[in-house]
Image (cartoon, helix red, strand yellow):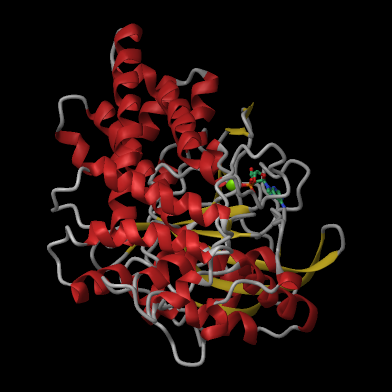
Amino acid sequence: MKLNKILFRNHYVNLGDAFYVKTAPSPVASPGLIQFNDGLAKELGLSSANLDSADGAALFAGNLIPEGAEPLAMAYAGHQFGHFNPQLGDGRAIHLGEIDNPEGTSFDVQLKGSGRTFYSRGGDGRAALGPVLREYLVSEAMAKLDVPTTRALAVVTTGEDVIRDQLLPGGVITRIATSFVRVGTFQFFSAKGDVEAIQKLTDYVIERNYPFVRHTDNPYAAFLKSVVDSQAALIAKWMQLGFIHGVMNTDNMSIAGETIDYGPCAFMDSYDHDQVFSSIDRNGRYAYSNQPSIGLWNLTRLSESIIPLLADDTEVAVEVAQDILKTYIDTYQDYWLTGMRAKCGLSASTNTPVNDDKELIEELFNSMAENNADFTLTFFHLSKLTAQPSEQDHHIRRLFDNPKQFDDWATKWRKRLSDETQSETDRQVYMRSVNPVYIPRNHQIEAAIRAAEDHNDFSVFHDLLEVLQNPYIEQKGKIRYTLPPEPDEVVKQTFCGT
Ligand code: AMP
Ligand code: MG
């Protein structure tokens, strides 16, 4: 079956060759289509392209370049663990072009693991199958959990091994984003003092991702404010789900406010404020609780890069930037509190002062930390509790090392509920819609990877992926996917896989 035409547009190419290096993917020995995202293909208007085919596999492996695509590797810089590197760029990703969905929204399409580029430095430009499966599972789970994210369209095996600590089977993931421009892309041009390029890049991003700022008094300031807002919203969502990105370098922060560059990311099981999984994050710079402040740190780097656009006078421009950055903490706090209130079934339309709710929520987290309570299950079972203590309490109490501590908190929570105007059923339905029962737990991802890498068995991957399609609904026979790891299943560290 032949591929039907995909209509690519290539606006990024038009920015000029300072922005990228044109690079074709390097073909692989034997493309094997492991996973094709039918649902996403439909959303993108690609259903009629015959992608779920041998030609599709060839395309997703980089062996066949679709008509109209102009493959390139994007240039960017970035602060990695606080240290500036002026020259990073897509070392193992290749940008095929943009496509429009039926509603007219543009999406970028990239292959990751598709061979060396100008920016590969010492790397092989390849990806091992494990990290590719991990990105597919976690990014698709995030999408279904209503978290802004890059999406995964397909996974192929390459029929080739990659050399890491050991030989591992290779894979390529096709990922989709509303933008692959990063904070580091702005830094790339800022470090060169190329104001013209910064303006071109900013105009491109505004046109594409923030068109509504064009008609404001100072569109560049409004752009910065919008990015601040979307990052605050994104990080609040991560915090509400116990998600730890793991490598929040500025080159891994999307200008569109989407979760990007899934590497050693992970969801926590039992709650720990300072949880770190990434093996390379030795000082805990990107620990769970540091994510909001790192967001601000990264946004400050973005502001510095666009200072010349904010006002003619540098001092004025710095003031404009500072005033916008100052809003981040309150904006983040608002998103956090709104989301956490919803998770606890507390609506805003009561007489209870906001700060009392905040205190109550923080008390719950402190108690969860002291008692090793599972993050996801705590909120899931909380959603089922009634206004009066009942049999049902048993499920949540047993998550706490000392259930008495939960009881103490629950007494205060129930007292607060008596101030609610919504009915118990409404509250429970609402809570269930924001407190998932399934998240991609580390040990389950690991099991899926082990089966695939060690036994060429993708059934574990497919089963897990299936469950994650409906994270808020209890599915028959899937209870094991709700469970935290047994002691011998605990995954203490995660790896970049680069
Ligand atoms: P990451 O932290 O995974 O987002 O990657 C940081 C930088 O290293 C980016 O410029 C990547 O393109 C590059 N990189 C990571 N893995 C590889 C690889 N296997 N080959 C070439 N470049 C890589
Ligand atoms: Mg990256």
Q: Quadrant of residue 415?
A: bottom left
Q: Position of residue 368 (x, y in %)?
A: 51, 57
Residue 408 placement, left or right of 342: right
Give the residue displayed 38% in from the left and 75% down from the top: 472
Q: Position of residue 2 (x, y in %)?
A: 49, 83
Q: Nearer the viewer, residue 495 or 28?
A: 495
Q: Position of residue 339 (x, y in %)?
A: 32, 54
Considering only vertical position in the picture, is 65 above or below 472?
above
Residue 447 placement, left or right of 395: right
Residue 11 placement, left or right of 17: left
| Whether residue 28 can be seen here | no
| Whether residue 402 can be seen here | yes
Give the residue displayed 21% in from the left and 36% down from the top: 213
Q: Position of residue 270 (x, y in %)?
A: 58, 61
Q: Quadrant of residue 157?
A: bottom right
Residue furthest to the bottom: 477
Mark count: 0
Q: Nearer the viewer, residue 444 or 76?
A: 444
Q: Nearer the viewer, residue 327 or 490?
A: 490
Give the residue displayed 51% in from the left and 87% down from the top: 478
Considering only vertical position in the picture, is 141 above or below 125?
below
Give the residue displayed 55% in from the left and 68% down from the top: 136
